[in-house]
Every structure is written in structure tokens, then in C-alpha cells.
Image: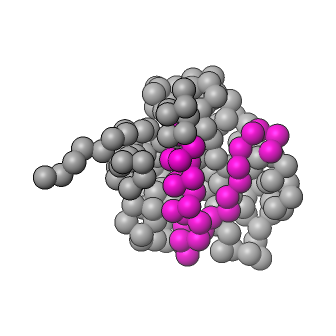
């Protein structure tokens, strides 16, 4: 008999288009990487069961990063227990736009756990955002920073697990 997970949580992936949100989710769920994903139109809904605290069913909402989906953001963020705020380490613009994503999230969800993700760490010679800069930004926004590579899989699982644990801590210790 398959046991129902004890916890069901909703995680949203936030960030500009092309930062690697979809690649990160597929790396986490299927442990696969593809060079080219089509842009996410609207939202992509995925699910993964995680074996923590009696079982967690994580519903992962991968939001399209295009400006045209901005009006739908509030709707997608409803009920989210936490989020990964993702930027591309090789793309200054994706880092500069983080405030907008965090603001959208906080306006809708208040103080739910957020984790800052610097993705594409495998592109060492193209990195534009320093560790120090990213760390300072994370600190000033009360987030932890994890640098990931969806391509190599570096820290991807750790990021999702860490966020899941923070969400559960918050739910359990209300």
C-alpha cells in the first residue's frame, strides 16, 4: 500500500527567462539535463515526493520569466509555501531584476522561506556576478545563497531539499 505523504507543499521558481528554472526542475526531478528547453509559457507544474519528515509531496511551479506573464504572477504565487529565486551567474540583468521577483513574492505570500540560487556555475569563465556580491544580496534579503549548475547537477538537489526543510520548519513551528 502506498502511503500518502504527510506534507504537501507548493514551491515556486522565480526569476527572469533563460536563468535555467526549467533545467533546474528537470535536473531535480529526473536527474537529466537538456541543452535547449522551450521558454515556459505561463507555468509548468511538476511534482516530486521527497523523503523527509514522514514524506513530502512537493508541487513545483515553474513560472514563465517573460514580462508578458507578469500579470499572472500573483495568481501563480497564491498558496506558495516558499520559493527558489534564481538568477544566471553569467547574466547581470537577471541579477538586477531579482528585487522585482522577491517583491512580487512577498506582496502575495509575506514572509515565506526563499532561497537565492545562482545558476550556471559551470560556466566559470563567463561569470559576471561575484560570490561576494551574491552573498551580500542574499544576506540583505534574509536568504541563503546556493550556487548551482543544472548542467552538472551541482547543488541542485541540495537547494530543493534545503528549501523544503525550511518550509517544513515553518509549518511545524507555526
Magenta stretch: give its range: 139-167
Q: Using the image as rendered, state which of residue 117 and residue 173 is in the foreground.
A: 173
| 16 in the magenta segment | no
Name the side, left or right, on which 93 lies relative to 6: right
Residue 44 percent across, percent down from the top left = 39, 46
39 over 167 or under it: above or below: below
Residue 136 percent across, percent down from the top left = 85, 49
Residue 63 percent across, percent down from the top left = 49, 42
Name the side, left or right, on which 3 lies relative to 66: left
Residue at horizontal 66%, vertical 74%?
A: 122
Q: Using the image as rendered, state which of residue 66 and residue 127 is in the foreground.
A: 127
Residue 25 percent across, percent down from the top left = 46, 57
Name the side, left or right, on which 17 lies relative to 94: left
Residue at horizontal 37%, vertical 66%?
A: 30
Can the viewer see residue 129? yes
Specify the farthest residue to the left.
Answer: 1
Location of residue 156 (image quadrant): bottom right
Residue at horizontal 47%, vertical 26%?
A: 78
Residue at horizontal 62%, vertical 41%?
A: 114
156 over 87 or under it: above or below: below
28 over 39 or under it: above or below: below
Q: Using the image as rendered, state which of residue 172 and residue 60 is in the foreground.
A: 172
Location of residue 5 (image quadrant): top left
| 165 in the magenta segment | yes
Q: Quadrant of the C terminus?
A: top right
Location of residue 158 (image quadrant): bottom right
Amino acid at each position: 500500500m502506498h502511503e500518502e505523504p504527510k506534507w504537501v507543499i507548493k514551491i515556486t521558481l522565480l526569476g527572469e527567462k533563460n536563468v535555467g528554472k526549467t533545467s533546474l526542475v528537470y535536473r531535480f526531478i529526473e536527474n537529466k539535463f537538456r541543452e535547449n528547453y522551450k521558454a515556459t509559457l505561463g507555468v509548468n507544474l511538476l511534482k516530486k515526493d521527497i523523503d523527509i519528515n514522514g514524506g513530502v509531496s512537493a508541487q513545483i511551479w515553474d513560472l514563465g520569466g517573460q514580462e508578458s506573464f507578469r500579470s499572472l504572477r500573483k495568481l501563480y504565487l497564491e498558496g506558495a509555501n516558499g520559493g527558489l529565486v534564481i538568477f544566471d551567474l553569467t547574466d547581470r540583468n537577471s541579477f538586477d531584476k531579482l528585487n522585482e521577483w522577491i517583491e512580487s513574492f512577498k506582496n502575495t505570500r509575506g514572509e515565506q522561506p526563499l532561497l537565492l540560487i545562482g545558476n550556471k556555475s559551470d560556466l566559470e569563465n563567463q561569470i559576471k556576478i561575484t560570490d561576494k556580491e551574491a552573498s551580500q544580496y542574499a544576506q540583505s534579503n534574509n536568504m541563503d545563497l546556493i550556487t548551482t549548475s543544472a548542467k552538472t547537477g551541482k547543488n541542485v538537489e541540495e537547494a530543493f531539499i534545503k528549501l523544503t526543510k525550511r518550509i517544513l520548519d515553518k509549518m511545524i513551528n507555526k
